[in-house]
Image: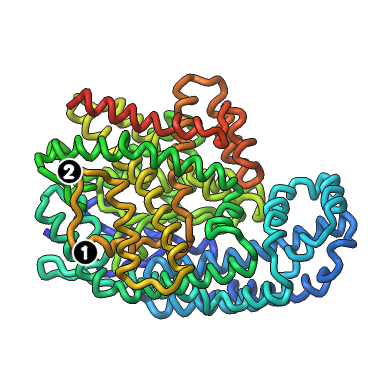
């Protein structure tokens, strides 16, 4: 039977009753009591006045500030970031609870417009900072109060070769609300508003995608074909979104002199292009040893001549069909965290009873899952779409890992707490691995062990192989867009050019699957984000191997790494564990863990 979705429940202090138990909703009052609360007006008014005052006090003067005045300047800038971040976190989280609510969309858009306008006078700050002469820049950090901010300003400094004039930077800042931001919003609202009809009942994208993991093959096919129908009807709009955003990016990159479309992402991730290239090449070379080999095993287990796309995430025939209650999932994850270190479970526990998780599937709610750090003087919020699947338990472990990481990094302050995407997946993937390893150790027999191993291998293939295939698709799309407008068929062809290569010969592809690029939000919101997942998985696999070797003081080193937030480069963070991501062999170490799981599956078969 198709899932019957309840009407939206957004009472901050209530839970949503489902077949999986009482699922928590967010309590956003730690940010603001309500959208019309006087505290929002207070903070908006302060922000408007302080941004103007900051520009008046410091524009044209940064190079001449003494250390004490520079420290005050940095602290004021950090507070502006915090207040603006608090407002936009509240507006954004409310919006993602129900993206089809016009009031929520208007509130977020109005907040974004105001804050963009207020902060336009601040564009000078990073531009002037980068104009400081190299010797003066180096001497600035001799002061201990300023020295702690050096990692942040080094990342700002990395953009120096690609800066535009002050006037153009202000224009881009102002124009952003009707540029990429507006197209992102159009994409989100379109995706959330898509209606899929299954057995005469209308449902949203999350519930329809969930059918692709159903035990019944006919149900999976029905879901896939309905996805194809709806994506096909909307492909021209999604193609327009991708064409516009890719062209906008190409124009800005060209003006900035960035050598590749990926350069901006590498700079923001604080990772060298050659490291990403080594990761990409290692994964692509491993396709036959990973995804091709695994899916051939799965084809045999399912008793099929070939796999269709709706079989990719199909449960195994021997898999338990029961769902996992919310209370059970909570205990599984907290027990796994506690087994690693009691402190980790203590950090995670408040998420469950303080309204820091929004777990239920609701009409209009954004699909997928995320952990939002908000600002360092509040706490993170986790969003899930929990449907009781074993994968949903792993998603809970994953997003909770992000939450723990964000809590630990908060002491670094607003400018240094944010972790580059390549390292942001560390705690989340590690949390998943802890949960998986605990459940695997408790498997009652080889059949259960086989199901669990297969599920983990599929998740790792989705995280590593699939995401690198996504990255290759994006690289091809942005390269092709430089030569002109792309039709939906052009984009479809680019999508299919990476699917067969990554998934392997066990698959055939239904007509219409070529449109499945349309719903992936990362392509729209964060170009080239996706390689961070593979980076994080490979890093954690290598890290977990060190943990399994019984390295003395591992837990302490691990927590120190998370507490560092964005204050250290990946080389510095991994050095205490004897690891180096710039060594091509590092990635083979991570991939060998997946191969080992597949070896065990072959032995069990």
Secondary structure beneath dot 2 equals loop
**Which badge, 2 or 1, is on the more N-terminal residue?**
2
The image's mark for residue 387 is none
Q: Position of residue 369 (x, y in %)?
A: 38, 55
Q: Nearer the viewer, mark 2 or mark 1?
A: 1
Residue 602 picture quarter: top left
Q: Nearer the viewer, residue 409 or 592?
A: 592
Q: Are marks 2 and 1 in contact (CB under 8 Å)?
A: no
> Circle 2 is placed at which residue position?
322
Give the left or right position of residue 33, taking residue 76 as reference. Answer: left
Identity of the residue furthest to the front in this view: 483
Secondary structure beneath dot 1 equals loop
The residue lying at 49 percent from left, 77 percent from top is: 107
Task: Classify the position of the C terminus by image quarter.
Answer: top left
Real-space Cα distance between discs 2 and 1? Answer: 31 Å
The image's mark for residue 512 is 1
Residue 97 versus residue 283 in the image, above or below: below
Dot 1 surroundings within 10 Å: few (below 14), some, or many (20 or more)? some
Q: Is residue 357 visible?
A: no
Residue 172 picture quarter: bottom right
Q: Position of residue 181 (x, y in %)?
A: 50, 72
Task: Classify the position of the N terminus by image quarter.
Answer: bottom left
Q: Position of residue 338 (x, y in %)?
A: 44, 32
Q: How many marks?
A: 2
Q: Position of residue 368 (x, y in %)?
A: 35, 57
């Amino acid at each position: 039977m198709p899932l019957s979705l309840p009407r939206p429940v957004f009472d901050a202090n209530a839970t949503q009753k489902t077949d999986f138990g009482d699922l928590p909703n967010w309590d956003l009052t730690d940010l603001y009591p309500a959208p019309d609360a006087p505290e929002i007006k207070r903070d908006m008014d302060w922000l408007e006045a302080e941004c103007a005052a900051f520009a008046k006090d410091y524009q044209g003067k940064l190079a001449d500030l003494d250390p004490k005045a520079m420290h005050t300047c940095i602290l004021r800038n950090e507070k502006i970031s915090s207040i603006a971040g608090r407002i936009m976190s509240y507006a954004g989280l409310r919006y993602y609870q129900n993206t089809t609510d016009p009031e929520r969309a208007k509130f977020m858009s109005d907040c974004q417009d105001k804050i963009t306008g207020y902060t336009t006078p601040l564009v000078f700050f990073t531009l002037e900072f980068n104009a400081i002469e190299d010797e003066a820049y180096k001497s600035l950090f001799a002061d201990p109060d300023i020295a702690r901010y050096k990692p942040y300003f080094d990342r700002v400094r990395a953009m120096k070769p690609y800066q535009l004039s002050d006037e153009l930077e202000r224009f881009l800042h102002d124009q952003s609300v009707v540029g990429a931001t507006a197209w992102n919003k159009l994409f989100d609202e379109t995706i959330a508003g898509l209606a899929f009809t299954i057995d005469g009942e209308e449902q949203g994208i999350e519930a329809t995608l969930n059918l692709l993991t159903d035990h019944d093959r006919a149900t999976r096919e029905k879901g896939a074909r309905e996805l194809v129908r709806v994506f096909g009807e909307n492909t021209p709009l999604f193609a327009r979104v991708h064409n516009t955003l890719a062209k906008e990016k190409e124009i800005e990159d060209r003006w900035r002199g960035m050598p590749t479309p990926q350069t901006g992402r590498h700079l923001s991730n604080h990772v060298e292009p050659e490291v990403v290239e080594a990761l990409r090449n290692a994964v692509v070379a491993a396709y036959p040893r990973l995804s091709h080999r695994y899916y051939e095993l799965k084809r045999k287990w399912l008793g099929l001549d070939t796999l269709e796309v709706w079989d990719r995430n199909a449960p195994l025939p021997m898999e338990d069909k029961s769902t996992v209650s919310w209370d059970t999932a909570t205990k599984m994850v907290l027990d796994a965290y506690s087994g690693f270190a009691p402190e980790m479970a203590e950090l995670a526990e408040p998420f469950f009873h303080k309204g820091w998780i929004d777990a239920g599937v609701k009409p209009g709610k954004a699909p997928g899952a995320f952990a939002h750090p908000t600002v360092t003087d509040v706490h993170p919020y986790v969003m899930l779409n929990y449907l009781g699947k074993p994968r949903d338990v792993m998603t809970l472990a994953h997003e909770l890992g992000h939450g723990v990481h964000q809590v630990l990094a908060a002491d670094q302050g607003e400018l240094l707490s944010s972790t580059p995407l390549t390292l942001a997946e560390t705690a989340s993937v590690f949390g998943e691995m802890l949960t998986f390893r605990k459940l695997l150790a408790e498997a009652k027999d080889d059949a259960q062990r086989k199901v669990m191993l297969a599920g983990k291998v599929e998740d790792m293939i989705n995280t590593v192989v699939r995401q690198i295939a996504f990255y290759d698709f994006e690289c091809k799309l942005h390269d092709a867009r430089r030569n002109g407008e792309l039709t939906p068929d052009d984009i479809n062809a680019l999508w299919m050019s990476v699917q067969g290569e990554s998934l392997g010969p066990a698959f055939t592809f239904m007509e219409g699957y070529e449109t499945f690029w349309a719903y992936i939000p990362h392509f729209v919101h964060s170009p080239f984000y996706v390689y961070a997942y593979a980076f994080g998985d490979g890093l954690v696999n290598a890290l977990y191997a060190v943990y399994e070797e019984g390295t003395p003081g591992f837990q302490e080193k691990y927590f120190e790494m998370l507490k560092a937030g964005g204050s250290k480069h990946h080389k510095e963070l991994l050095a205490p564990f004897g690891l180096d991501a710039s060594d091509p062999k590092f990635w083979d170490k991570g991939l060998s863990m997946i191969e080992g799981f597949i070896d065990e599956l072959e032995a069990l078969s």
